[in-house]
């Protein structure tokens, strides 16, 4: 075991700031012994695991710092599989600071970001994909993101990856065995069976790769640009959706010169709405910068709400904008605004398109239909079936690399390449799959993953 894993670590595990209680967590071989040295109450060294004990914590001069409840988790029956003590104290930042300083003076070290979860992984509590799901679960802010993180933390995704890897290892070992008998020209791995297996693996991995678009929506939300000409009511729509005056609304064209972002949760999906500068040719240099930023944001969006003005726009202008959006290749919704003042001819023409919605943003008319259409466009039905969904960009990248390696195996089989080259491509696939669950790791990989966790986790 590495030396730093023998050290007892400490961190505040609840959110910083004033609260009714705060929880300070210690983990390490000496966690219970060190806590017992400053705890006045029952002898913690004689207590059972998963028990809570009321007492006081005092400094070396006997001064009471706080009344606390110390909860014990004796190894290996803890989150980290080490001795763990969770101290519930009053939620004063001053008290928390004094308690942590006291423990530091007793030889405890401040935990690094994610170090508790890293120790749990290194001690075999769960694999790397499950460890990453802990952070996702903490940050989950919708039902869908919570469900995805919980499924991954409980091992659903990991189990699939491990099963795929185990099947591939069998054939890899057979081919490696062939290499040991290279001079005798024997074949232990049936090529037809290997090809069948690789195709089966590819079908599963391709489905996982394809699920990332949905997984990214679940985890990070849907960047949704509200675009259109000046004065079509984009800022009014944003304010109506958010139910607050977030954007400046004016009759003067070109009021919005930079983009304004905010988000709302619609039926478990977070939409990050981006109100942008109106699309038009302008001599105003500042407004022109805003228009260019609008175009850039549209290219980066997952969804575009194209707003047109039922009162002032012409059918030619609307069709021109729709053609431009179709060329972008990004999903978009046509939304005609100012329904209460609509030109009848424009309204009748656009009504022929069943995908066009009509609203009055200022009167908040038609907004519920728009919200429903937004959720329908994202379509979480696949997720609701319980299928595994990839939400982590690192996992996605490794799956794509695995996909590439397995395709190389198929090409090699079709070309009748020798076993040593087949073995090389299979090893690559095994390595990428192993990196997902942590069966293959590097110090840099672990440092990068756990540095993104909060300190107390």
Image (cartoon, grey):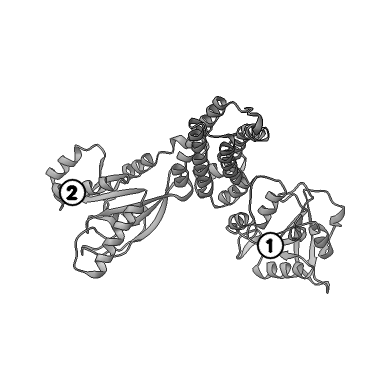
Q: Is residue 80 left or right of residue 440?
A: right
Please tell me which of labels 1 and 2 falls first in the chain: 1
Q: Nearer the viewer, residue 106 or 299?
A: 299
Determine the residue located farthest toward the left in the rendered image. Answer: 345
In which quadrant is the C terminus drawn?
bottom right
- The vertical placement of 59 against 343, above or below, is below
Residue 320 got which mark?
2
Residue 73 visible? The answer is yes
Residue 143 visible? The answer is no
Circle 1: is it few (<14), some (14-19), or many (20+) Cα within 10 Å? many
Across and down, in percent, residue 181 comes to: 67, 32
* Spatial CA span between label 1 and label 2: 58 Å
Residue 80 got which mark?
none
Residue at x-position 71% and y-position 62%: 10
Q: Nearer the viewer, residue 425 or 364?
A: 425
Residue at x-position 56% and y-position 36%: 422
Across and down, in percent, residue 333 comes to: 29, 45
Residue 193 is drawn in which quadrant? top right
Label 1: state its secondary structure: loop
Q: Nearer the viewer, residue 402 or 57?
A: 402
Across and down, in percent, residue 260 comes to: 35, 61
- The vertical placement of 26 against 175, above or below, is below
Check disc 1 and report the residue beneath it.
111
Determine the residue located farthest toward the bottom in the rendered image. Answer: 61
Q: Is residue 100 left or right of residue 420?
A: right
Label 2: state its secondary structure: helix
């Amino acid at each position: 075991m590495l030396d730093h894993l023998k050290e007892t670590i400490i961190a505040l595990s609840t959110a910083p700031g004033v609260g009714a209680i705060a929880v300070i967590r210690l983990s390490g071989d000496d966690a219970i012994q060190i806590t017992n040295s400053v705890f006045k109450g029952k002898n913690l060294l004689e207590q059972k695991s998963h028990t809570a004990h009321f007492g006081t914590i005092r400094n070396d001069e006997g001064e009471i710092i706080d009344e606390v409840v110390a909860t014990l988790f004796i190894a290996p029956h803890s989150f980290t599989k080490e001795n763990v003590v969770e101290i519930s104290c009053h939620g004063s930042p001053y008290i928390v600071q004094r308690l942590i300083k006291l423990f530091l003076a007793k030889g405890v070290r401040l935990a690094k970001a994610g170090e508790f979860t890293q120790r749990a992984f290194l001690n075999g509590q769960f694999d790397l994909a499950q460890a990453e799901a802990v952070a996702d679960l903490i940050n989950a802010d919708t039902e869908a993101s919570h469900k995805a993180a919980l499924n991954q933390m409980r091992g659903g995704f990991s189990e699939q990856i491990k099963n795929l890897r185990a099947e591939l290892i069998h054939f890899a070992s057979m081919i490696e065995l062939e290499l040991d008998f290279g001079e005798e020209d024997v074949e232990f791995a049936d090529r037809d069976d290997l090809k069948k297996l690789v195709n089966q693996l590819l079908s599963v991995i391709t489905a996982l790769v394809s699920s990332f678009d949905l997984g990214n929506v679940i985890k990070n939300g849907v960047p949704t640009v509200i675009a259109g000409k000046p004065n079509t009511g984009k800022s009014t729509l944003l304010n109506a959706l958010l139910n607050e005056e977030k954007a400046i609304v004016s009759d003067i064209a070109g009021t919005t010169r930079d983009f304004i972002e905010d988000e709302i949760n619609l039926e478990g999906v977070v939409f990050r709405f981006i109100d942008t500068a109106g699309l038009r040719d302008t001599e105003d240099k500042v407004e022109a910068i805003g228009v260019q930023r609008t175009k850039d944001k549209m290219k980066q969006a997952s969804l575009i709400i194209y707003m047109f003005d039922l009162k002032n726009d012409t059918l030619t202008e609307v069709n021109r904008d729709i053609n431009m959006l179709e060329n972008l290749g990004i999903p978009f919704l046509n939304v005609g605004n100012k329904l209460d003042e609509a030109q009848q001819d424009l309204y009748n023409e656009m009504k022929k398109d069943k995908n066009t919605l009509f609203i009055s943003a200022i009167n908040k008319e038609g907004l519920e239909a728009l919200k429903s259409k937004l959720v329908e466009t994202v379509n979480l039905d696949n997720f609701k079936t319980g299928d595994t969904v990839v939400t982590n960009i690192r996992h996605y990248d490794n799956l794509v690399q695995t996909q590439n390696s397995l395709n190389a195996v198929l090409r090699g089989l079709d070309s009748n390449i020798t076993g040593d080259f087949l073995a090389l491509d299979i090893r690559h696939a095994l390595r990428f799959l192993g990196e997902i669950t942590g069966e293959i790791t590097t110090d840099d990989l672990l440092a990068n993953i756990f540095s993104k966790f909060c300190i107390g986790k």
